[in-house]
Structure formats: C-alpha cells, structure tokens
Image: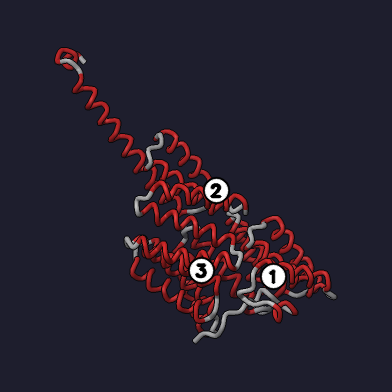
C-alpha cells in the first residue's frame, strides 16, 4: 500500500541530496550551501525552507523563524504559490511548536489557500498542520473528520509519513477519550508503517505513542523499553523536540508506576530541554508533571496550588484544553489530600484535649 517515506520539504537540488532520515545538521549544512549557490528566488526559497525545518527540529527557534520568512519572501518574488504555501506551512508549524496556536492557525490557513491547486503536497501538509493544531487544543469534534480525510488521501497516494501522522492523531484522540484498546492498535499500526517505510522520525514518535498506552494499561517496564528504543532514534537524528517529549513521557510512565522521585528528575530534565528550545507547550506540560510529582513527594500544598494557578494561566494562554482537564484533576487531588490531612490533624488535636477542655471548646 505504501512506498518508502520521502521528505517533500527538501526540494530542487536538495531533494536529490537529502532523504527523510538525513540528520538535521546535515540538512542545515546542505541548505546553507544551496542558499549561497542559488541562482534564482525559487531556489533560495527552497533552500531557506529546508533550513527552517532543520533549525526548527533542532530547537533553534529564532533561526527557524528567520529562515521561513526568507523562504516566503523569495517564493513571493518568484511568484510561486506552492512555494509560498510551503513557507507558511513551516511558519505555522513553528508557531504551533512555540505554543502560539492562534498564529499557527492563521499561517496554516493561508498556506492551505495558497497551495490549493498549486502544490498537492503543500496543501496536504498545511491541512494536516491545521488538524494537528486543533487536536492539540483538544477541539476533537472540529478536526476528527479532517484526520480521517487526510488518512484516506495518504492511503490513496501511498504516502506513509502522512498515514502515520493521521493515524497517530486519531490514536491520540482515542487515548485521551479513554479507548486504550483502539489507541494501542492504531499506534502499533503506525509503528509498522513507519518501520516498513524507513521513516525513523515517524517510528520514534509512534513508539512513544505505544509506550504511553502501554503505561496507561499498567505495563510500565515495556513502556520504558519502547521509550529507550525511541530515544536512540531521536539521538541519532538530532531530534531535539522529539527527545524532550520522550523524556516527558518517561516521566509520565514513572509517575504512573508511583516512582515519583525518578519522575521528578525526568520532568525537570524535559523542562530544561523545552526551555532551551523555546517550546512553551512542552515546558508547561513538563512543569505540570513536575508539580504533581513534588506534591506526591510531600511538597507544601499551598506552594503546589500556587504553581498550578500559574500553569493554568499558561495553559489558557496557549489554548490547551486537554491539559486544563488534567490540571483540574491534579488540583482536586491536592485539595482533597490537604483537606484530609487537615481533618486528621484537627481530630488528633481534639483527642489530646482534657475532658473539661473538650467540653468547653
């Protein structure tokens, strides 16, 4: 059904030199050289697009932002709507990575309009970006059908990367709404497709999805093994963002296994990694994991609740509905534990009073 994975974001002469598993340092070096040697605005646009994607995945946000804008300016000068769509897709993807979800929606919407009828793949990638942005926000009703449409397109054209993306998005929605059996089957299908297509990046993300569901089913050791396998791929390909999300997921697995001290260390590591790459969504999610781990380890309730209030504002700013539901559950748990401990202290104090004191208190 599917062929080998390919990377349509590497275009022109770069398409012949690079493939989907090229390391991002290699991609960046080739893109910089191609930009220097470019003889036309379209060639510069293509080189800048590759540079933008390499920098984004390496966590170099400012460089990625400058590169996608450079790509758009050159594509506009060349009068190529497809290339303009690709540039805005890259910018929208970067905005989503940085937690600017409304901006991501605007850029990706423009990318869809520009690429429509001009470049089928750019159009599909931009639609996929819109669907993922909605899913991250927790707006499942708005994007569920779009995920299914994109999966049908991927299968019709034999595009494994798009199939893995669409399937993993559908799987994540099933996982978040409680259907672990369906989620596991879809994530495992993603692993199979990505491995057969030699799509290392898709393989790593899919393994992370399987690990998450296995952990939720109580299979902690297997989940940790899968995350170690995915981490090796991330390090080989310089996947900075994927590695940070892998570490956050390892924290989740350890937390569910009640290994709170180890979870705390992994969440703290992920927070540092997300901070270094200016990825506020990942940082906020890791901070929530860190807060609940510290709470389980006996942190002061007042400090925990104050931190949760700060995180709630950040989640609302970014627009993370699913994360807000998790945060509310954590707050309820901390509040309930605090109330139980307070009641216990009051009961103990009452028992220590003399009979006369109890009678007059």
Task: In the rendered view, tell whether residue 8 sits above or below residue 284.
Answer: below
Asked if the residue at tag 3 contacts the one at tag 1, i.e. Cβ–Cβ closer than 8 Å, the answer is no
- 256 or 166: nearer the eye? 256
Residue drawn at (51%, 43%) of the image: 313
Q: Which residue is mark 2?
A: 317
Spatial CA distance of label 1 from label 3 is: 19 Å
Of marks 2 and 3, the one in the foreground = 3
The number of discs equals 3
Residue drawn at (41%, 73%) of the image: 188
Quarter of the view holding residue 293: top left
Task: In the rendered view, tell whether residue 306 sits above or below residue 289.
Answer: above
Quarter of the view holding residue 354: top left
Residue drawn at (60%, 55%) of the image: 98
Q: Where does residue 76 sit, x and y in percent of width and height? A: 77, 69
Spatial CA distance of label 2 from label 3 is: 29 Å
The crowd level at tag 2 (other Cα within 10 Å; few <14, some 14-19, many 20+) is: few
- 244 or 177: nearer the eye? 244
Q: Which residue is mark 1?
A: 27
Of marks 1 and 2, the one in the foreground = 1
Spatial CA distance of label 1 from label 2 is: 33 Å
Q: Which residue is mark 3?
A: 204
Q: Quick one: label 1 or label 3, which is nearer the N terminus?
A: 1
User: Is label 3 in a helix, a strand or a loop?
Assistant: helix
Q: Quick one: label 2 or label 3, which is nearer the N terminus?
A: 3
């Amino acid at each position: 059904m599917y062929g080998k994975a390919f990377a349509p974001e590497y275009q022109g002469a770069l398409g012949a030199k690079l493939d989907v598993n090229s390391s991002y340092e290699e991609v960046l070096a080739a893109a910089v050289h191609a930009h220097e040697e470019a003889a036309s605005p379209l060639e510069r646009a293509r080189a800048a697009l590759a540079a933008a994607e390499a920098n984004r995945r390496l966590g170099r946000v400012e460089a990625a932002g400058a590169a996608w804008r450079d790509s758009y300016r050159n594509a506009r000068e060349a009068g190529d709507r497809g290339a303009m769509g690709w540039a805005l897709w890259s910018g929208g993807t970067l905005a989503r990575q940085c937690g600017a979800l409304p901006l991501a929606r605007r850029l990706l919407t423009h990318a869809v309009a520009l690429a429509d009828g001009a470049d089928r793949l750019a159009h599909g990638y931009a639609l996929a970006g819109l669907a993922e942005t909605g899913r991250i926000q927790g707006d499942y009703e708005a994007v569920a059908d779009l995920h299914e449409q994109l999966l049908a397109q991927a299968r019709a054209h034999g595009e494994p990367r798009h199939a893995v993306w669409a399937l993993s998005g559908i799987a994540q929605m099933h996982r978040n709404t409680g259907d672990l059996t369906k989620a596991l089957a879809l994530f495992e299908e993603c692993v199979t497709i990505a491995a057969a297509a030699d799509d290392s990046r898709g393989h790593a993300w899919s393994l992370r999805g399987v690990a998450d569901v296995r952990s939720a089913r109580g299979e902690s050791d297997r989940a940790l093994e899968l995350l170690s396998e995915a981490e090796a791929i991330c390090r080989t390909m310089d996947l900075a963002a994927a590695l940070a999300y892998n570490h956050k997921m390892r924290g989740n697995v350890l937390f569910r296994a009640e290994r709170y001290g180890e979870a705390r260390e992994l969440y703290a590591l992920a927070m540092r990694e997300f901070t270094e790459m200016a990825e506020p969504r990942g940082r906020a999610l890791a901070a929530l994991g860190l807060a609940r781990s510290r709470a389980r380890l006996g942190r002061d309730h007042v400090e925990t609740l104050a931190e949760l209030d700060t995180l709630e504002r950040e989640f609302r700013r970014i627009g993370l509905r699913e994360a807000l539901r998790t945060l509310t559950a954590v707050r309820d748990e901390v509040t309930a534990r605090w109330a139980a401990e307070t009641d216990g202290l009051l009961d103990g104090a009452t028992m220590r009073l003399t009979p006369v004191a109890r009678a007059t208190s």
